[in-house]
Amino acid sequence: MAGERLPVVRVLGAPAAFAVQVTRPAFCATLAEAAVSRAPGEIAVVTRVGGNPAALCTGEPFVVEYGGLVTGLAAGRYRVRVYEAVGDGPAGFLSSANVTILPPAT
């Protein structure tokens, strides 16, 4: 993303769901997994990223985007906090956003 400092976090609301997208410097064959915790009006998304140890990669710099969709949410306003851990390291805070979840389409 030209002109943007990495990582960049985007949170977008949708009917009964929201999407999270993170753009960050890549690892060799980047792998990402995430977990979500919920409390009334609060959601935390914790991702763990790292390189695939079985991959053969060159040392070229790349950017990777990863994301996910959190579904099954009641309509309302939520505070979303996004954290990221690299490898087995501790999770660090990336960003937070307020998102409005719309009722499911009928």
Image (cartoon, rainbow, N blue to C red):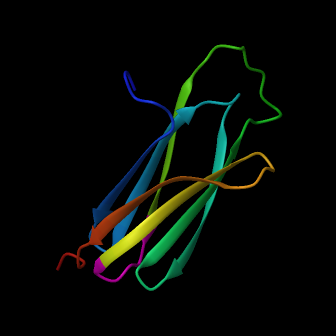
Magenta region: 70-76
Q: Is residue 88 above or below residue 73?
A: above
Quarter of the picture holding the N terminus: top left
Question: Relative to 35, is 16 on the left or the right?
Answer: left
Using the rendered view, name the quadrant where residue 18 is placed: bottom left
Query: Residue 2, position in %: x, y?
Result: 37, 21
Q: Is residue 74 magenta?
A: yes
Q: Is residue 86 above or below residue 4?
A: below
Query: Residue 7, position in %: x, y?
Result: 51, 38
Query: Residue 38, position in %: x, y?
Result: 52, 79
> Which residue is pictured at 82% across the width and 34% down the height?
53
Between 20 and 71, the one nearer to me in the picture: 20
Q: Is residue 60 magenta?
A: no
Q: How many marks?
A: 0
> Which residue is pictured at 41% across the width and 78% down the height?
72
> Which residue is pictured at 28% across the width and 72% down the height?
101
Between 74 and 89, the one nearer to me in the picture: 89
Using the rendered view, name the quadrant where residue 26 is placed: top right
Q: Is residue 32 above or below residue 76?
A: above
Question: Relative to 53, is 47 on the left or the right?
Answer: left
Query: Residue 44, position in %: x, y?
Result: 53, 68
Quarter of the picture holding the C terminus: bottom left
> Which residue is pictured at 27% across the width and 70% down the height?
100
Question: Relative to 101, is 87 on the left or the right?
Answer: right
